[in-house]
Every structure is written in structure tokens, then in C-alpha cells.
Amino acid sequence: MIERSGRQLSGWAALLLPVLWLVGATPQLAAQGLVMRGVVVDEQTRLPVVAAALQLLAADGRALIATITDKQGRFQFSAPSPGAYKVRAERMGYFPKESGLLSIAAGAAPIIELPLSPRPVKLDSLMVSAKPETRPLRITEQLIHGRLLDDDTREPITGGTIELREPKGKTIATTITDQYGLFRLVTPKPGSYRLRGERIGYHPAEQSVLRTKLGDTIRLDFHLSVKAVLLAPMLVVGSAKEWASRHDRPAMQKLYDRMERFGNRRHAQFIIRDTIDAYDKRRYTVTQMLQDKIVGTPTSGPGCNGGAMYLNGLPLPIIEIEDTTKETAGRLDLDSFVLAQLEVVEVYLHPTLPAEFMAPQFRPLARSTVPPCRLTVLWSRR
């Protein structure tokens, strides 16, 4: 059985398929075993969680580097030095999860599992109401009223449909039960009638023939028995919290500042939520959206080197995949990170590169000291 988050898993090295290798993991660090591997799973279904955003944290809680899980929920970090670290995982639709302290030393390669608990979405209640008939009865009309009840619990059934029918099956009148299960129907003239009751989740039922006379008033209890009903799949769409109410508000404020500083420059571009939604409706992947929005932007040129990518303000190195074909090796699987999970994307071209992404603490994680030609920063929805 797999241990819970933060614990080393014996035997997992043989079970894990090829996992992600980060650029920050130099051959020397990998040889020393300063590598942390793991998998993020759904705590209830035990299925892998795809495109979860992960951060490697120092013992004091400082965020060092970020990555995302692949299609099998796997991830990998390369620690900058031996010591104690924590891993934090976030995914829309789940509660954030943070592991305990994990010791990474030369020759030791901890493998962990982070189970995420689903975050339920509370929907607004739906009230079905009916306006009761209050007019006086005409000379030829009779009143039939009563309650619609659950046959097992004897509790009233709200929102049930009651039909008044002729013996041959023609429907004369229809009403909906109120919050107390009460209904009221009026027959147009004396005669024989049937009542049919139905409600989703119950077997439809029909009362035996009711014979009414002039001036009659009939009161009855109508019982329905429970029936299992297979409903069609339901898509629930939720919106993220307002940026001002998030736990990482300082990072968002810095984003606002950059939008104000660079918003009118041709070397900076911001892809906001409305634009991302439009691409999502057209079923674009993250890669396709970036190619469409920043087409023609260079990744090489005088004084710069390649392209850099950040996730939630932390460096996101290009992923190197073990034991794969040359076509996929060295590429970041951004298409596991669906557009619905993105809040905003920043794109900067050399030489317009914000100083905060060139901070000294991130330089040891880069391949080169030469600044990138293009810088892309992804911000996920929380």
C-alpha cells in the first residue's frame, strides 16, 4: 500500500513510469541523488491529478521552484543543495496540500505521494413554487385537494406534478405541489376522473377512479414510492476568488504593477482572463494559444538566449523526459495545464524583462547567465 504524503515510498522506483526531469537538475546534482520525485493523486479515487501546480519550499516556507504534474500525476524536483524541504500542491477543484519536512541528502532520492482532497462546490438552491387557485368554484365544479407523500417516510414531496385526467387518459388540469406537498385541482363538471402523480426520483403512480357529484369536495393523500434514477452528467463551472481576497495577494499586486509599467510597450503583452476564455471556447490548448498570441517572437538573438518560463512567480524550467522519443524530449507538457486553470499570462521580449524575474536567488537554477530572449509567466486560478 502507498504511504500518505511526505513519506518515502519503498518499491515505487520500480512502479513509476518515466518521470519528469527539470533543467535545474544538473548531472552532478542528479548523480548526488539530490532529486525528489513523486505523484499527486485524488484522495478519494486514488487516480492521478493532472496539471497540479507544485512548489518546492525551503524549511522556512520560502518558495524556491515550481513545476506541474504530467498526465500520470508525476512530478520531479532537483534540490539546489542537501537539506530539509517541503512540497506544496494546488489544483483548481481541490484543497491545497503541503507535505511535511523532507530530508534530501547525497545518495538519497525520496519518492513521495501527495493526496489532494476534492473541494466541493456549493450551488444555489432552486425553488419551484406554484400559485394556488383562490377563485370561488363555479356551480358545476368540484374541488379535489390533498397531499403528495413519500410512501416510505410519509414526508411531503415538494415539487411533484399532479395531473387530473379523464378515464380515457386525456389530461384536463395540472398542478405542482408546494413546500408542504399540498396540491389543489378543480374538476370542470361532475363525473369520473383519475389522478396521476410523478416526481423525479419516484415511481409515477395513478389513483383509482374518483367519482364526483355536484358540490363534492374530495380530500386525499397521494403516495409515491422511491425509484433510483440515473441522471445525465452535470457540468459544474465555478469562478475563482477575486484576486484581492487570495492568499498570494502581494504577488498579484506586483502583477498589477507590471501591467501598469509595461502595458503600453510593444515588448510586453498580457493575456487576461477574457481572452483566455475565448481561446478555451475554441478548444485551444495552452501551447496553441501562446503560439497564436506571440507568433513571430524570437527565442534567439544578439545578447539573449532561448526562452524562460515561470509559474505563479517561480521559475518553471523546461522539462526533460526520460526514455521518450526525440520528438517529445526537452519539451514542457503545457497541454496538461488546461486553459480553464489559467488566470493571466505575461509575455516579455528582450530587452524588456522585469527585474524581479532576474533575481539572484534564481540564477543558480538557470543553464546560462545570459538573459532569455522571451519570458513567459503563467498565473493559475486558485
Image (cartoon, rainbow, N blue to C red):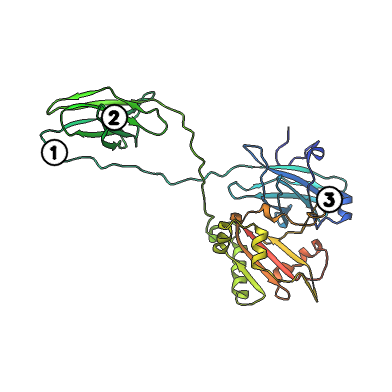
- Residue 119 on image: x %, y %: 56, 45
Q: Earlier in the sequence, mark 3 or mark 2?
A: 3
The correct choice, above or below, for 325 with respect to 253 in the image is above
Quarter residue 310 falls in = bottom right
Which of the pair 45/339 is nearer the observer?
Answer: 339
Residue type pointed to by label 2: Gly
For disc 2, the neighbor class at 10 Å (few under 14, some 14 to 19, many from 20) is few
- Residue 260 on image: x %, y %: 59, 74
Q: Residue at x 58, y 57 (%)?
A: 280
Q: Which residue is mark 1?
A: 136
Determine the secondary structure under disc 1. loop
Residue type pointed to by label 3: Leu
- Residue 276 on image: x %, y %: 58, 61
Q: Is residue 70 left or right of residue 120?
A: right
Q: Which residue is mark 2?
A: 169
- What's the distance in space between the residues labelled 2 and 1, CA to CA? 27 Å
Which quadrant is the C terminus positioned in?
Answer: bottom right
Q: Which mark is residue 34?
A: 3
Which of the pair 366/108 is nearer the observer?
Answer: 366
Which quadrant is the N terminus positioned in?
Answer: top right
Q: Is residue 293 left or right of residue 204?
A: right
Residue type pointed to by label 1: Pro
Q: How many marks?
A: 3
Q: Earlier in the sequence, mark 3 or mark 1?
A: 3
Determine the secondary structure under disc 3. loop
Which of the pair 345/53 is nearer the observer?
Answer: 345
- What's the distance in space between the residues labelled 3 and 2, CA to CA? 78 Å
For disc 1, the neighbor class at 10 Å (few under 14, some 14 to 19, many from 20) is few
